[in-house]
Amino acid sequence: MTIDIFWRIPTHGEPSSHRSRKPFRGDWFPGDDSRRQAGLSGDDGFTYADYLAEIARAAEIAGFQGGLIPSFPMTDEPWVISSVLARETRTFRFMIPFQPGFLNPVVAARATASLQRATGGRALYNIITGGGGPQQLWWGDPVGHDDRYGRTTEFLDILRGVWRGGPFSYHGRFYQVEDAGLADPLSREEFPEIYFSGSSDAALASASKHADYYLTWLEPFAQLRDKFARVKERTDALGRKIKCAIRVDIVARPTEKEAWNEVERGFENIDPAVLAAHARRNEGSESVGARRQQALRPTTINSYKDLIIEPNVWSGFNLLRGGQTQGIVGSYEQVAERLDELVRLGADAFILAGTPHLEEAYRVGEEVLPLVRGRAGAPALRAVG
Ligand SMILES: Cc1cc2nc3c(=O)[nH]c(=O)nc-3n(C[C@H](O)[C@H](O)[C@H](O)COP(=O)(O)O)c2cc1C
């Protein structure tokens, strides 16, 4: 069995290195117009979307299958960005995260089938169900945690039901559909692979019914082994098979020392107030996944070394660029070895990322991926295309 490896498209903007906090890359200026005001951004017509396209093309050339396109209140919209990038790439696959509750399932099926038809089947999903709290209401969604997962399950029931044409009817708690079904030729398109993230019991119940891949952030390795075993057990009980995938931030350099030096330089530029708040972040969050990440942090942090939670695993990535906390730091060989270790404990796919995503796509693609042996020795990666 091959290992699927994706990159990430930074729709949240990004700095040019870990030493900078300013997400200026690609003409992205949230909350800070100083460069524009200083006249440093000429009218060259180069937009943020062009920068994302450069990353997608670099990742495609460097051997990644495709990319995750994050979806948060401060990001661009992943369905739209996928359509833009589709014409800029040839084989690159678009992993679109979305919360089922925000789209009618029949409309979502039609939009996905259209994207499949236009791109030769390059769309796939990351089904997210929402971390709750104020952010959930930002999206206008008042539904509680476990009910949201119930809604996700119904949504996916309908998506599958209508995909091959109708007539399909469904009477659930959240959705009613009568005699629906995609019309030909959309109904002939490949049903997209489903990645599914969420760490709660409610998430696992929904994932085991519908997901092709259970997706998690990086956690301590022993903890991940247990998590994967739990997901696989639940899915086996339904007579299905599920694969497991991990999102991993990476700092890979020719030597381990150079990699930690990069982390240290980034750490030295963190605002002390952000560092102080870091230890408390996600406390009381409704998201089980976010609380699992929070539980791994020390309460006081004096050095980047305080955030090393096991060999080559650093839990301060969200201090450098927001997002998830755990990632892998090391020489090219060490990073590849740790990825292989994750494969041995059950990973079938990775979504990797590094800052800045353009240069790091080439670095990780050229220096690290060829060293990943996968299950049965190199080459382990699923061929692009
Ligand atoms: C790898 C990964 C990527 C995620 N990406 C997004 C995202 O783009 N947007 C979002 O709102 N939530 C995202 N999430 C959050 C989860 O899908 C889920 O909503 C959250 O973990 C709360 O569910 P839980 O309580 O079951 O953990 C992501 C989670 C993981 C593990």
Image: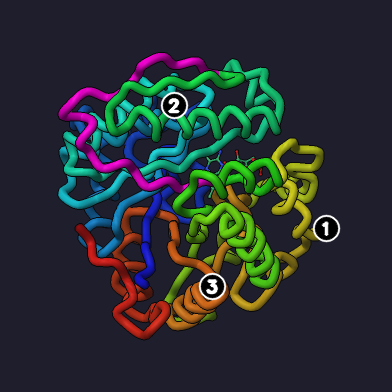
Q: Secondary structure at mark 3?
A: helix
Q: Quadrant of the C terminus?
A: bottom left
- Disc 1 to disc 3, how far (Cα)? 29 Å
User: Amino acid under label 3?
Assistant: Leu
Q: Quadrant of residue 187?
A: top left
Relative to 167, say whether 191 is above or below: below
Q: Secondary structure at mark 1?
A: loop
- Disc 2 to disc 3, how far (Cα)? 42 Å
Q: Earlier in the sequence, mark 2 or mark 3?
A: 2
Residue 24 in sight in this render:
no
Residue at 37% x, 55% y is: 7
User: Amino acid under label 2?
Assistant: Asp
Q: Is residue 279 left or right of residue 335?
A: right
Q: Quadrant of residue 274?
A: top right
Identify which residue, 254 or 134, lies in the foreground. Answer: 134
Residue at 29% x, 50% y is: 55
Which residue corresponds to mark 3?
342
Which residue corresponds to mark 1?
300
